[in-house]
Image (spheres, grey):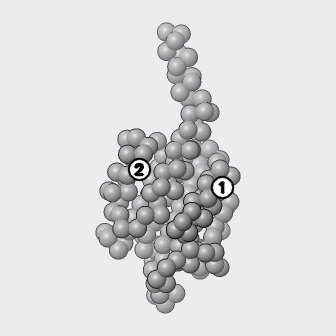
Amino acid sequence: MIRSLIISCLLASPGTAGTVASTAIDSFNAICFKAGQTAAEARMRMEARAGSPLPFDLTFWDKTLQPAPDAPPKIERRCEVAFDGDHTGTAIAALRKQMATPPVFGFAIDLPDTHAEASGTALIEGRELLRGRVAVVHVGTRDGQTFMAVDRLPRGWEGG
């Protein structure tokens, strides 16, 4: 009984939370920047890395591949992970490293009018991509969780 109590305490320790954060951050960086995947494919790839069920929340849709009726206008793709605790510094450092790794993830531009800094935002940045597309990367906290998101806007997003 004491042994099972010790194991339970260890599994609930902050070290476990850090492992979930690391897994979520690594999974986001490995999967969320890949174009051409459906929600099911993104989830399958995340689960292959992090286990099933995922130990973090995943939001993914791509209107160019599947209908996404609740998606905001002017955003064609979103990938977001959210996990317990404030790990924004670690998330930003890992995101910056990922965006600088070839192929480099565009270059910084003014934030598109589709996005704005919100309460809890630690980083929000527009990125110009190839073929006239724009992305927005966003890291912050909400409801006791860290979130990392990347949204892609289509070519000509300003006009529609």
- Residue 93 visible in the shown view: yes
In the shown orientation, is residue 14 left or right of residue 158?
Answer: right
Q: CA distance from mark 1 to mark 2?
A: 20 Å
Amino acid marked by disc 2: Met
Q: Is residue 13 above or below residue 130?
A: above
Q: Is residue 149 above or below residue 83?
A: below
Look at mark 2 in the image and give the residue it sits on: 46
Q: Residue at x 36, y 68 (%)?
A: 36
In the shown orientation, is residue 155 left or right of residue 13?
Answer: left
In front of the other: 52 or 1: 52
Disc 1 and disc 2 in contact, CB within 8 angstroms = no
Query: x%, y% of residue 29?
Result: 51, 56
Q: Residues within 10 Å of mark 2 (few under 14, many from 20)?
A: many
Could you say whether the residue bearing mark 2 is in a helix, strand or loop? Answer: helix
Query: x%, y% of residue 157?
Result: 48, 84
In front of the other: 154 or 121: 154
Could you say whether the residue bearing mark 1 is in a helix, strand or loop? Answer: helix
In front of the other: 105 or 160: 105
In the figure, residue 117 lies in which quadrant? Answer: bottom right
Q: Residue at x 45, y 53 (%)?
A: 58
Look at mark 1 in the image and give the residue it sits on: 93
Amino acid marked by disc 1: Ala
In the figure, residue 140 lies in which quadrant? Answer: bottom right
- Decide which of tag 1 and tag 2 comes sooner along the chain: 2
Q: Residue at x 32, y 70 (%)?
A: 65
Query: x%, y% of residue 149?
Result: 53, 61
Q: Is residue 88 above or below residue 138?
A: above
Q: Is residue 121 above or below residue 27?
A: below
Q: In the drawing, what numbered circle is on residue 15? A: none
Identify the residue at the far top of this view.
1
